[in-house]
């Protein structure tokens, strides 16, 4: 049995070369952002194009390797901020192909906003999402944890929660000219709520119309209405043109229901840099300055199968391995994490140094050990010279 968590200590370019082609389902990673002072690969220019060129030159061979180790159905999620987002997007187009681009998610990791600097108080960064092969990609861009009970305010006689959605298609692109088979009359009784495709006692004929009275279309075909009449309800509604009879779908909050994820992820949903520091402090101490919250990685994991092999090639404080353990504990999944970090020295005078963690990979290892112990997981550490 492969270990639940593996840590490779070494340069990710060397380590990636040892991983099998197509062996990874999802990569989440968070490379150095090239802020001009924390980038190990900065060249002597320090600013301007030379700085970007050096960063891109560092990333290019690593992204080629990331692409090679991803399975065809796999996906890369990569965090980045304004310093390199433009260069990274173009580099991803070059390495993966622009047809593989899925999303540029805005991640609100600093809700108060960064107060330093002369202009806006930056409160977000990005998560770029790219498929290895968009046609076979297994990403499900939905989440169960973002489904709120309060979005389903109505309660049926049997206790099930639901919300009402108009049966009429509210998208103006769909109309009798573009979808003629969905423009047909239904019969409904606003007193009993009953809906049918044929007349019945007490029923009125109802055509789909937009709010301004123009003809519209239904979202359901007539056979679907016949198959699920109990999921529809006829009611009197007050519109722009006064009282009229309309049909709504009863949209149920069923167990396992998922919701399409938006491309803005809020700190209140996934955590912030502050909550990430607190999470790290709780498990090993305040030994790393800019960890990601486990909630960010857990949301990524929610989009992929629960037996995924999850790789982080710039693992830092080991957030990805921690998120994998938390996700498995929450849903019974069998995900495995593979983390890589360079044994680069920690800063003299830092909390990490004071805690005896001389290299950044010692921080990764300390957290993954604590995670393995807490969750009863196995950890293998491989040192590459
Ligand atoms: C922005 S941090 C990642 C933080 C991480 N997401 C977390 O939550 O703690 C980037 C990490 O990449 C590591 N790193 C930089 N170059 C590397 C390389 N060539 N191979 C492996 N790790 C590298 C650095 O040591 C640093 O820990």
Image (cartoon, rainbow, N blue to C red):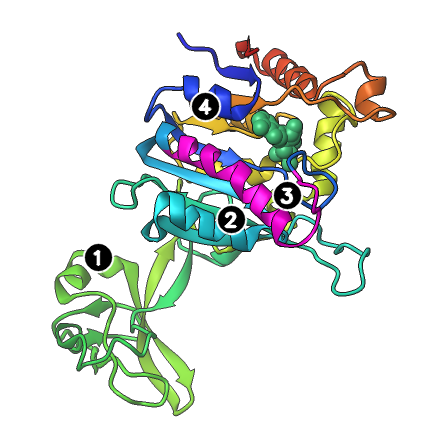
Which residue has dot 4 on it? 16
* Residue named by callout 2: 88
Q: CA distance from mark 4 to mark 2?
A: 19 Å
Mark 3, Cα crowd under 10 Å, few <14 / some 14-19 / many 20+, is some
Mark 3 or mark 4: whose residue is earlier in sequence: 4
Disc 1 to disc 4, C-alpha distance: 52 Å
Residue 209 lies left or right of residue 67; in this view the side is left
- Residue under the image location 52 percent in, 28 percent down: 313
**Dot 3 lies on which element?**
loop
Would you identify the image quadrant in which residue 68 lies? Answer: top left
Q: Earlier in the sequence, mark 1 or mark 4?
A: 4
Chain part drawn in magenta: 42-67
Q: List the residue tagged with mark 1.
A: 228
Residue 179 is a magenta residue = no
Q: Main secondary structure of the magenta part?
A: helix
Where's residue 136, x and y in %? 26, 40
């Amino acid at each position: 049995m492969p270990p639940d968590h593996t840590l490779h200590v070494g340069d990710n370019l060397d380590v990636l070369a040892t991983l099998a082609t197509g062996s990874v389902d999802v990569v989440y990673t968070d490379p150095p952002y090239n802020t001009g002072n924390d980038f190990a690969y900065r060249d002597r220019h320090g600013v301007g194009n030379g700085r970007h060129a050096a960063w891109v030159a560092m990333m290019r061979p690593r992204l080629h390797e990331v692409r090679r180790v991803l399975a065809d159905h796999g996906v890369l999620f990569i965090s980045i901020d304004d310093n390199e987002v433009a260069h990274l997007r173009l580099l991803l187009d070059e390495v993966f192909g622009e047809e593989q681009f899925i999303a540029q998610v805005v991640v609100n990791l600093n809700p108060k906003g960064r107060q330093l600097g002369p202009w806006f108080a930056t409160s977000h960064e990005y998560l770029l999402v790219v498929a290895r092969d968009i046609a076979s990609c297994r990403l499900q861009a939905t989440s169960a944890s973002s489904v709120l009970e309060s979005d389903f305010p109505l309660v049926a006689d049997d206790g099930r929660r639901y919300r009402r959605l108009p049966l009429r298609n509210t998208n103006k692109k769909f109309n009798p000219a573009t979808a003629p088979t969905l423009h047909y009359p239904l019969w409904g009784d606003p007193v009993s709520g009953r809906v049918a495709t044929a007349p019945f006692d007490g029923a009125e004929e109802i055509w789909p119309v937009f709010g301004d009275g123009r003809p519209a279309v239904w979202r359901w075909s007539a056979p679907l209405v016949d198959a699920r009449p109990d999921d529809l309800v006829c009611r009197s509604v007050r519109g722009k043109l006064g009282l009229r009879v309309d049909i709504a779908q009863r949209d149920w909050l069923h167990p396992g229901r998922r919701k399409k994820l938006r491309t803005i992820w809020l700190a209140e949903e996934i955590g912030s840099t502050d909550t990430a520091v607190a999470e790290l402090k709780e498990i090993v101490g305040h030994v790393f300055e800019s960890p990601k919250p486990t909630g960010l990685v857990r949301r990524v994991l929610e989009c992929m199968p629960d037996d995924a092999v999850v790789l982080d090639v710039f693992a830092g404080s080991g957030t990805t391995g921690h998120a994998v353990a938390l996700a498995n504990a929450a849903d019974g999944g069998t995900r495995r994490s593979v983390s890589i970090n360079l044994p680069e020295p920690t800063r003299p005078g830092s909390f990490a140094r004071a805690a005896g963690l001389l290299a950044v990979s010692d921080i990764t290892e300390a957290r993954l050990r604590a995670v393995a112990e807490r969750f009863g997981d196995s950890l293998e550490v491989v040192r590459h010279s």
